[in-house]
Image (cartoon, coloured by chain):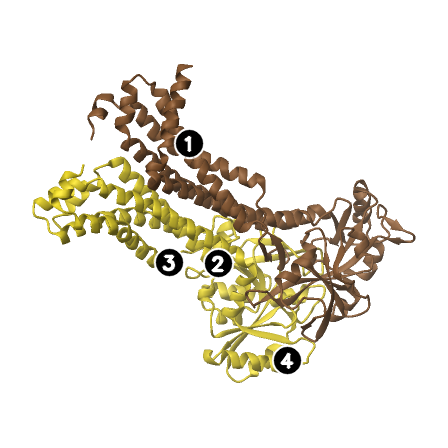
Amino acid sequence: MKFIPLLWSSLWRKKFRTTFTLLSIFVAFVLFGLLMTIRTAFTFGVEIAGLDRLVLIHKVSLIMPLPISYEGRLKATEGVTLTSHNTWFGGVYQDPSNFFAQIAVDPESHLKLYPEFKLPPEQMAAWLADRQGAIVGADLAKRFGWKIGDRIPIQGTIWQPKQGQVWDFNIVGMYDGDAGVDKTQLFFRYDYLDENRRGGQGLVGWYVVKIADPSRAHEMGAKFDAMFANSSAETKTTTEKGFVEGFAKQVGDIGAIMIAILVAVLFTMLLVAANTMAQSVRERTSEVGVLKTLGFSNGAILALVLGESVLIAIIGGALGLGLSWLFVQNGDPTGGMLPIFILPARDLTIGAVMIVLLGLVAGAWPAVNAMNLKITDALRRS
Amino acid sequence: MNFIKQTIAVTMLNLRTIPQRLGSSGVAIVGIAGVVIVLVSVLSIAQGFTAAMEQSGADNRALVMRSGADSEMTSGLAAPEVDIIKQAPGLRREGQAGVASAELYVIIDIPKIGTNSPANVPMRGVEPQATTVRDEFSMVEGRMFQFGTNEVVVGRGAKVNFQGLTVGSTIHSGQNTWVVVGVFEADGSIAETEIWCDSRVLQGAYRRGNTYQTVLARLDSSQSFDTFRDWLTANPQVNVQVRRETEYYAQQSRQLSTLIRTVGFGIAALMGIGAVFGAILTMYTAVSTRSREIATLRALGFNTMSVLVSVLSESLALAAIGGAIGGVLAYLAFNGYQTSTMNFSTFSQVAFAFQVTPRLLGMGLTYALIMGLIGGLFPAVRAARLPIPSALREL
């Protein structure tokens, strides 16, 4: 501990250089934090998708509807604990660029199936009492400045109401959830949709089924698909995780390519920082000679040099990660295009490990050199 | 005159000694090259995607959808409406029939090559007029499908991105079976990601009754659009919106290309700051290791301005090298790279190729030079201000 002042003063030997080394490490880790956030956004929250939830879609494609009569048969199947159905609404609020998901659901079964959506009980009661009621995610409400009690007109695209083109919803509740839960959706009542749409009565988009034993997911999926085989609407069942992953894969290489390029560049930026740190040690060869003359052991020299480079890395890196974390707390800056905008704790840990590694790697070569230096050589070199 | 000569002399001296400082110069070059690679390649994604979408429209074609629909996917038109649309003025006619194709636009699940997971491939049911409406359409392999059968033709882009779409293969989808009989191209437009079949057959397969989703109409000329639109929107028998095809596709691409561009520019700006720091450090080192030489020059009577310009030129030269390397690498790695992604407006796949255009390369190089200029400025001022006596004394 008593060497901290020594470390500190050698750090500021050349203020200009240390400042810029710190800044470049800082920027590198701001970048790292944002990249990990974008990567998470591109996987659509696959980490939190439930393994005990299965998704049933029409075998031909997601856009084909399934009959509502399937629900009873699914519920009656042994091993099924909960079922619920979802119907994509795809309406336009004011302008097509205000895109967000609107989904028609059965309120009670939906929220039972998705306990991660937290809705106060009195709002739930209000929703059950109001056929035109809808609940919105906290992020979505913030985006449009909606409050409970607001009436929201949404233009139907797939589903046209019997009168006119606009569907009205009353916001009766706001759901919240932990980080990583998509809080940008609007859920409204299926009975309102089904009663008021011009066609398509009795059709739903997809089913979500909760099973008692997640290890039987595959077997259960096969069972459901067999149940509806050779009917007019055959199904394809996947785990919710598989479904979300499949969706992320459809977006395709774009996310992966962006990440790959950026990782390569992060690496070069770290290289720049490491090079400067190494250089600053090289310049002090004669000082190392003096320290050795004063009786510093080889181990102490090694620790001093490594300590200095780790210290720089930690200061710059921690500030960088911290800033990116703060930035992410503010939510998605693109206005709804990246609904899952979080910096996962796991990635923060990876970042912390990388910071220390950077310090060690950048310091290793000069530290070993300094350690092996003969006093006479060190003092002779200028 | 003297000033210019001096400047050239010092600059040449600096540039010729770059090889002696290969290590730190190399780091500056690599840093700048990295930023340029990212900027150019990320923007090439947006460029390729936008180009594919823009090529998809023609000025002399109009797309008719149900009013309120925001994409072909969500539109729906009944058969009687289609008949009325085909009688609208402004539509090109050949003999009795209007040159228009009533179409269905649906999704079919087909695994993507590489990931093996199902992708939403767009499938379009067309009428015989479809290929007359789209004059860029041509077969490159096999033949056109026969109307009234379950034959299909696939776009070039669909064939390379999705599994089992070669001529002669069959696609099993639910209870439907489709036979691939040909591959078509359409000037690189997004139609090349689609699978085409007879709209009447598709109506049956997807249980759509006698309904369609859109009508694509060939206009008499690009000017007759207003006539065509006004007649249809004023007609109470139909409830439709009419848009130029070009406008439709431009709007479709907006969301994704904005997202890519925002991310690309944002990240490149941030990295640019990092690279500027790298350049500053490099030039600072270059100046500090030569402070004695610089002081000597100044003592000999060299102008401070020429010292400043020489340091800046070195920094710009390094930046130019870095920018050029970055541009070339981005070009080699990504130009023409084939991929497909999801178009969120229709939830269906769009195949496209990355495009590294000269304009993007120019942008990358300009950005590199800006970074070099900023990176060199600090150290250059420092070199020019170096107090001669103390610098000469420095070890």
Q: Secondary structure at mark 1?
A: helix
Tell me whether marks 1 and 4 sit on the same chain: no
The dot on residue A183 is: 2
The yellow-coloured chain is labelled A
User: Along the horizontal axis of the image, is A221 left or right of A30?
Assistant: right
Q: CA distance from mark 3 to mark 1?
A: 35 Å
Labels 4 and 2: the sequence-earlier one: 2
Say which of marks 4 and 2 sits in front: 4
Name the residue carrying label 1.
B373
What type is the residue that disc 4 sits on? Phe
Task: Please provide percent x and percent y for residue A180.
Answer: 44, 60
Q: CA distance from mark 3 to mark 4?
A: 42 Å
Say which of marks 1 and 4 sits in front: 1
Residue shown at the point (49%, 63%) measured from the top left = A123
A270, A101: nearer the viewer:
A270
Task: Please provide percent x and percent y for residue B29.
Answer: 41, 40
Tell me whether marks 2 and 1 sit on the same chain: no
Labels 2 and 3: the sequence-earlier one: 2
Quadrant in which the C terminus of chain A is drawn: top left
Residue shown at the point (26%, 46%) measured from the top left = A312
Name the residue carrying label 4.
A228
What type is the residue that disc 3 sits on? Asp
- Mark 4 burial class by Cα count in 10 Å: few <14, some 14-19, many 20+: some
Q: Is residue A380 above or below residue A300?
A: above
